[in-house]
Amino acid sequence: MTATTRYDAIIVGGGHNGLVCAAYLAGAGRKVLLLERRHLLGGAAVTEEHLAGFKYSACSYVVSLLRPEIIHDLELAKHGLSIIPLACSFTPDLSGPGLVRWPDFARTHDEISRLSRRDADRYPEFGKAMGKMGDFIRPLLMQPAPDPTRLPRRLGESLSLLRRLRKLGPRGLAQFVQLMTQSAVDLLDRWFESDRLKAPMACSGIIGTFLGVRSPTTAYVLLHHYMGEIDGAYRAWGFARGGTGAISEAIASAARARGAEILCEAAVEKITTRRGSARGVVLEDGREFEARVVISACDPRRTFFSFVGRDQLDDDFVAQITRYRYRGSSGKVNLALDRLPDFSCRPGRGLHLQGDIAIAPSIDYLERAYDEAKHGAFSRRPYINLVIPSLTDPTVAPPGKHVMSAFVQYAPYQLAEGPAAWDQQREAFGDTVVETLEEYCPGLKDAILHRQVLTPLDLEREYGLTEGNIFHGELSLEQLLFMRPTMGWARYQTPIQNLWLCASGAHPGGGLMGAPGALCARRLLEEHYL
Amino acid sequence: MIDVVVIGAGINGLTAATMLARAGLAVEVVEARPVLGGMAAREPIADGYLAPVGIYETTGVRPWMLNAVGIALSPELPRLHGSGGVVVDLAQRRVEGVDPTDAAAFEDLVELVTRIGPLFWRLMDHPPIDPVASGWRSLWAAARVGLSARRLGFEALRELLRAAPMPLADFLDERFESNALKGLLAAEALKYRFAGAKSPTTALDLLAALVYQSAGIVPACRLLERLVAAAKHHELRVRCGVRVSSVNFDGSRATGVTLSDGMRIEARSVLSTVHPRQTLCELISPRYLPAALRDDLRAWRSQGSTARLDLVLAQPLRDNAGRPLSRFALSDNLSELERAYDQGKHRQSTLEQLVLTGQQFDLDGGFADRGHDAHVVCLTVQHVPSDRVVDENALRAAVRQRLSAIDANLAQHLRAERFTSVAALAQGFALDGGQFEHGELSLDQQYFMRPQIRCASYRAPLRGLYLGGNGSHPGRGFNGAAGALAANAMLADR
Ligand SMILES: Cc1cc2nc3c(=O)[nH]c(=O)nc-3n(C[C@H](O)[C@H](O)[C@H](O)COP(=O)(O)OP(=O)(O)OC[C@H]3O[C@@H](n4cnc5c(N)ncnc54)[C@H](O)[C@@H]3O)c2cc1C
Ligand SMILES: Cc1cc2nc3c(=O)[nH]c(=O)nc-3n(C[C@H](O)[C@H](O)[C@H](O)COP(=O)(O)OP(=O)(O)OC[C@H]3O[C@@H](n4cnc5c(N)ncnc54)[C@H](O)[C@@H]3O)c2cc1C
């Protein structure tokens, strides 16, 4: 079958970024076709039902970074998006009552005071300092990355960044440099003394990275997770009602309402080019479509090496994309539960279960989890970030039953025996996670009705996340800003004319943010490429 | 009343003092230890044999520094031996003992190092730019750095910007196959760092080490000898064996120092080459220093994890071809190096993994005071942080065991041995944690962050007090650069 209509834009991949891009372009009156390989939209932001009545947020499970301007522009609330803020952050403990951090500072103060009075006093200050840094970085999330190597062409952007940097003053600037280069532990050590407070705080610095809490540069990742906002409330994370997939559905609905055509079970095999310029796509089932521009919502390696082909690209660019690093380090275990788990350090049903729950008893525990992964094995005692969304959102489980989502690190894509070994180690990995949890909530095992274990290999195969990296490439400094995915090509354009990137492998990177999709669309429109 | 008191007679202190004396100032140096030289000073290992307790080699000695103190020296380009017959030869710009692909990749790396050299030296030879200052002078300095960066060209700039935040292991894995070569380069790059090859930002350490080594290496005691001679020539007054116990202020500026014996030296300015936290938090009354700065200094990381071991051998260590070894590193691969770091990081007391780097000197290097036909080997041993409990004898045995890879009969040749723990270094040189460079050379503690953003220009936030130890920029290479730049700052202020 050949194309009968020619589109303005074809978007390859129906992750949330692809959908955002589609919605913006369609909203500007462009004729858009979006193609998704799977039977459902959302990519890593999906809701799946594996046992009747139990809705898993299979991959991504909490939202915070989604840009408010996107929610506003696309009227996502009208399209059914509703976000429920997390109640708190709970860190259970094997000996002692654990720690709960509430949005209410007074309550948190009481909690932290049990560990250290000094830390309790400083906690709000820390929040303010991070807030200040967040305010500094946040604008960068909604503009193409300023490229200081492109002077004088981009002089304006770089100068304004420089001016804002200088405005921070000496102390602020020093803090900024530290945030960009220090480890999460170094950063926290400056503020706090209690290991039991620092450990759960440090975790934000390692999510999605193949680094430990003591590795330099993890302070930035920590800040990245502090940058979110729901309705302007700073550092707020929340659940999407109906599971994370509801976000993708809302965006898809906004895109359709604006006239975008969306096809599922439409796996792209090739992006076709003519004289160095993209002209369309060929699907695995042979269908072909043509468009003025092709926009890939998949990661750079998949885009350039699978869809385009190395032979279409110059050697230097191929070398750069080859060097772009993925190495996923996270896994996910989703559980359907017969009853609510009971944490022995804080028994019973309480508000503390309605936030995120971190298995992060000490800095050393986290660092050792990393050490094992560094040498090619999954952590025997991993860091786990748990949520029980059914407590807050009853639509995701049958009455009285629950779903539990466990995000787990470290599960290195590259096992010592190679990635293929994950097929033999999947269940052992799942068991490790369940056994770790069982230590904190005895009886959990017996309550499990169904379990879904996602190894990095599964993330790659099922969700198209290369090497299982949840962010389409490591969020390390050398792969951020004007270097994402590679220096010279960080503005959504690619060396193939009319081929663009709009997903997490472009600035500002991964997470449920929507920014790359929106920025790519904005550039296409504002600079009249489309 | 004299012009300047210099605290510390290490390489930085002697360099600064000599430069100031040459500019016509009346200078006095105070050194806590009985001898000149700081960590480069030689002390007896055993009857008749001497070696530096701390520093045995100096890299990055620049012609402008030598001129500034009026001495001559000719640095040599090193040959560095690794495991399995791998030799990095910077004079020939090549590596031996690896397959042709790796050899070619090494030439590319040397090429990159040559390309980025001018930018490095632009950064290292000058005071750090002040990112918040206004005024033409600082703008001009920043513009010159920018121009040097641009002159690299797109590819080299991309390589540098990409490498700077990267883990060294990734940087090496992208380029080389040979485990021995990777282990060798990583051991050399990280020998003073409390970091593993998988720690981000360590690729920069290799680039810096190669740039520095491409400028040549000198035995530290040779540089020291010349500096001492220059100091004598300028009739520098030096007081050894007495500590400075405080730096004095009259409310608005420094007025001199008080010594541990109660004596006061009145001076218009004070230049300290001591660890920055020692200088600012121990030698100065807290009321003179902003509380925020004290807080920030408390967070200054200078936990060392490199110990020193010196051996006196009857027979020299030899390479595969039977020639006496000079510089070498024993680290077979990156994962071994990483495990050594893990053990240090977790303060484990086992000694399963050790990373050794070292240099062998023959006796005309000045390591004996009478004519013995022996050889002195100076070693760095990683990672043994000072707060880690290790059995010293077990450690020595483990090092000997490791060295037997080079010389199976080491035990029969061993005449004497001296171990210097990190704690002993910290104690002996007021190092405050035992990091030799007076502060970990991590990315957040370099350039305008060294030692703090408000005193990176060598000027403490107190008038008349200058910081010229390795806790100030560039803080690398034990070559006197920090002292020289501090002396320049002081001269510019007059
Ligand atoms: C386990 C896990 C937990 C996470 N948790 C969170 C979280 O709690 N909060 C948060 O903010 N972020 C989280 N993330 C990260 C976040 O989900 C992702 O970074 C983000 O969803 C990526 O969105 P994207 O649109 O850029 O790409 P994707 O969602 O990866 O979209 C790419 C799309 O392309 C499709 N595709 C692939 N190949 C083809 C083809 N040949 N033809 C057509 N289509 C194709 C894929 O099926 C997919 O739908 C998590 C990720 C994972 C994996
Ligand atoms: C084991 C080890 C090996 C090293 N090897 C090398 C190497 O091979 N090559 C290299 O380039 N670098 C090496 N370094 C790094 C090097 O030591 C530093 O770069 C160097 O010490 C900095 O020189 P400095 O003059 O600033 O400090 P120092 O040499 O520490 O000089 C400071 C001096 O001040 C004195 N002092 C301290 N407090 C007082 C006081 N209150 N009053 C008076 N005097 C005081 C000290 O005793 C000391 O003599 C090594 C370090 C160590 C510990």
Image (tube, grey):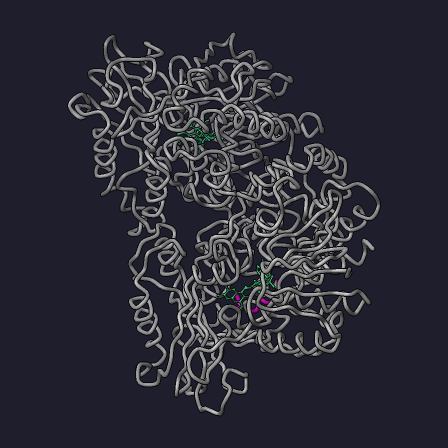
**Furthest residue to the front?**
B262
Q: Residue placed at 62% from the left, 47% from the top?
A: B284
Q: Decide which of A134, A35 is in the foreground and name it.
A: A134
Q: Residue placed at 75% from the left, 67% from the top?
A: B19
Could you tell me residue B255's position as x and y percent? 73, 52
**Furthest residue to the left?**
A446
Could you tell me residue B118's position as x and y percent? 70, 62
The answer to whether residue A326 shows anywhere in this view is yes
Q: Is residue B13 left or right of residue B203?
A: right
| Residue B111, magenta (yes or no) | yes
> Considering only vertical position in the picture, is B480 above or below A521?
below
Q: Quadrant of the N terminus of chain B?
A: bottom right
Q: Which residues are magenta?
A: B105-112
> Considering only vertical position in the picture, is A16 above or below B62?
above
The answer to whether residue B156 shows anywhere in this view is no
Q: Quadrant of the C terminus of chain B?
A: bottom right
Could you tell me residue B94's position as x and y percent? 54, 74
Total labels: the figure holds 0
Q: Is residue A392 left or right of residue B364?
A: left
Q: Quadrant of ligand 2?
A: bottom right
Q: Decide which of B12, A307 is in the foreground and name it.
A: B12
> Considering only vertical position in the picture, is A288 above or below A323?
above
Could you tell me residue B469's position as x and y percent? 63, 58
Q: Decide which of A316, A485 is in the foreground and name it.
A: A485
Q: Is residue A230 left or right of residue A425?
A: right
Query: Residue B340 falls in which quadrant of the image?
Result: bottom left
Q: Main secondary structure of the magenta part?
A: helix
> Considering only vertical position in the picture, is B339 above or below B235?
above
Q: Residue placed at 26% from the left, 41% from the top?
A: A380
| Residue B390, magenta (yes or no) | no
